[in-house]
Image: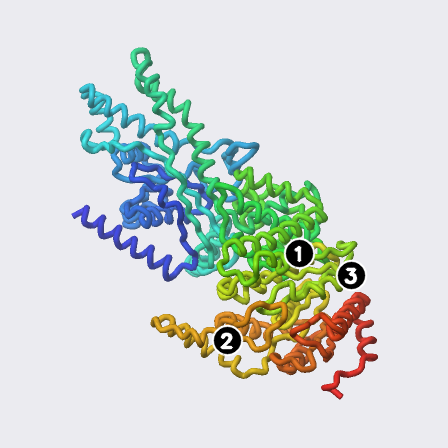
Amino acid sequence: MRKFIEILVFAVSKIIFEFLFNKILKSKILYAGQENVTENPTLFVANHYTRIETALLPYIHWLVTGRRLQVLAHQIFFVGWFGEWLRICGAFPMDDPKRNNRIVGDLMTGRYNWAIFPEGNMVKNRSVFERGKFVLDCPGKKGPPHTGAAVLALKAEIFKRSYLNAVDSGDRVSMQYYETTYDFSGPDEICRKSIVISPLSISYYPLRTGDNFLLYIVSKLFGKASGRFEEELRVEGNFLFKDTDIDHHFGPAIHLDDFLSHLMPIKRGLHKFFRDEDINNLILEWQRTKLTQRCMAEIYQRIYINVDELASYCIRALPAGLEEVEEEKLRLAIYTSALEIRELNDTFVHSSLRGNLLPIINGEGYQPLEEFFMILQQDNLLTFSEGLIQINRAIIDAKSDFHRVRMTNKIEVLANGLEPLESVTRLIRKNMGKSLKQLRRDICSYLLEQDKSEYIIAREESEDLIYPEEELADHESIFLEGSDKEHSTGVLLGHDLLATPNQMKLFAEQLHRAGFTVFCPRLTGHGTSERDLINSSWEDWQNTYNRAFTLLKHSCAKVIVGGFSAGALLALNRASRKGVFGAFVLNPAVSLKDYDFYLIPAAYHAAKFMRRVGRPLHRLEWRELEHNLDDVRASRISLTTMYEWRKLRQVCKRSMPKITVPILVIRAADDPVLSTYSSDRITNNVQSEYKQQVELEFYRRSLFSESQGRKLMSTVIDYLHDLNKGVDFLNKQKEELPLPDSAN
């Protein structure tokens, strides 16, 4: 009956946990490395940062193995039916006098796996590493981690081997001692597999404090919480009831054979001279510290590095006593360090440091980092003012209250979490030690190399290249540095859909001769094959354009964005963000003359449906081009690309009201594709203090050649020079310009 009740209670408990984590709690319980979990009797060792872990570990263990896990919990919880429920679920009181024997016996027999925290208590400040060794800095404990977990695992393996030796030699006295002490009935119950230690790393992101549902409930039931209890509710309640990633990473199992096998022959040799117990104690003394340090290293090697920790350590890496730093330098160091950390072997990063991190440094703002900076400002740790960050050294450098540090000094807590990762901290200190000028150079070199390598890889992997091999170099990105690039104005050019930077080459060279640094990037998917273009999206094109903007932003004093047709849409989107000095657009592809283009969504979804049912409509999926450009080899465009182009136009329309920088809009007198309403729509919607629309005679087939092309280029260059003189000068010049024919 008792066994049936235990099975029922455990099953109900699993259902409750699944319901909580899937329906009630907002935290995401994630785990990885489960392939490292063996079927051997296992002692799991994990870092201890919150009380949540005691409840989470059995649940995670069940998800991975389908088995029950034993953990230690504080004795105050083991009262009445609740205490009995905890025991059935795998918890065991810390003060039970038979605790250690129970753990050793379970590992010897393989009845249950166990989880123990080598740190002993919660390490709220995450201070566990000092001068190359693991050292805890907690109230009542300043020194190496507890070796109890290592000792119990070693004892279990040593005693198991000693018991089996007693069985082989027929030593009934020794057999009886082990069977009675560790609660098993004979050799059939002993697990013949080696006992292993499985390191488990637990990471939380983000660390946020404040009111939450758990704090509210406790306050209503028991009155206002205070002291440690309040701190834990404010921190751990947010982990559970607000969006939080709780990552669990299982490391490779540590086999105790590696620590004992070479000592067993020595033990047999000493058996004639010393008691078995004394020899075991000697082995434990030899190996307990070594094994504990190995466990701690394996645990912290798999901590997931997040953007908050990286930013915090960058601040820690500043010279002692420094009270301010350039915001640009900090952002560049964070970005550069993130890229380099992602390349390190055996280093794990949280999703907040994966993907596209360019917004950290290109003025758009990377939401996870901006949110963290806002929290630090609210906590009075940092102040942002006119490109500088003021650092509140009085708080950051002060000795923090251990039980409130997670609320008062997040920089200390988060930076402490990276200290055990010496390759990471060394890398961060290297980058923070660089000058702003050097960081800028490094970023520009990296982004330019990234641009070049992407084109090389795309060419090597593409089949049916549009252009012959000998012409491919003509279609790569164009980057022309001004004579004094650090004080020059950078001009960013976006080429048209289906084209390549070669379309803008004459214009780029003319701008360079006029004294500007110029960059015209090859948009993703262009210049290689039709398949590459189909597989690219408008976000890919915009990301390429934004990366080029970032390069110019950190290599020039100011950046002006521009583009032709679809490239103009990219420029408008970029102009709606921070960091842009001005903009110009040539024949922006906002509105089209051919009303068939407005049927693109319906045609796209119809074609997609027919592909799914196995009846593709090839004639529907491609459109022949009637108005091709001389420097564009493509004679048709896919429906998929047109659909992406439409999405880009829709995004651009929403971006226009956010544009406040000076802007010049140039439209062709008679463009066969674009409606003249495109330029009117821009000037009517942008919020710029200066906005000018000019109509010129120029042609798609020969964009920058002949007299019309030269007129187009000179108009833009005059505008750029005037823009450098200021908005007031632009407005004065505008008053002297004749109105376009359409406005007379």
Farthest top residue in view:
273
Left or right of 630 in this view: 60: left
What residue is shown at x 52% (from left), y 75% (from top)?
Answer: 624
Q: Quadrant of residue 269?
A: top left
Residue 23 vs 190, above or below: the answer is below
Residue to which mark 3 is pinned: 513
Label 2 element class: strand
Image position, residue 573 (x, y; %): 62, 69
Q: Amino acid at mark 2?
A: Arg
Q: Secondary structure at mark 3?
A: helix
At horizontal 51% and vertical 31% (from top left) the residue drawn is 143
Does residue 704 sit above or below 139 in this rendering? Answer: below
Instruction: Please provide percent x and percent y for residue 470.
Output: 60, 56
Q: Amino acid at mark 3?
A: Arg
How crowded pointer 1 is (Cα within 10 Å; few <14, some 14-19, many 20+) is rated as many
Give the residue pinned by disc 2. 623
The CA distance from mark 2 to mark 1 is 36 Å
> Residue 670 falls in which quadrant of the image?
bottom right
Q: Residue furthest bottom?
A: 744
Q: Is residue 219 above or below residue 424?
A: below
Which one is nearer the viewer's eye here, 66 or 333?
333
Q: Is residue 279 left or right of residue 493?
A: left
- Which residue, given by chain and number where applicable, does mark 1 sit on? 551
Residue at (76%, 74%) from the top-left corner? Answer: 707
- Amino acid type at image mark 1: Leu
Residue positioned 82% across, 72% down in the render = 729
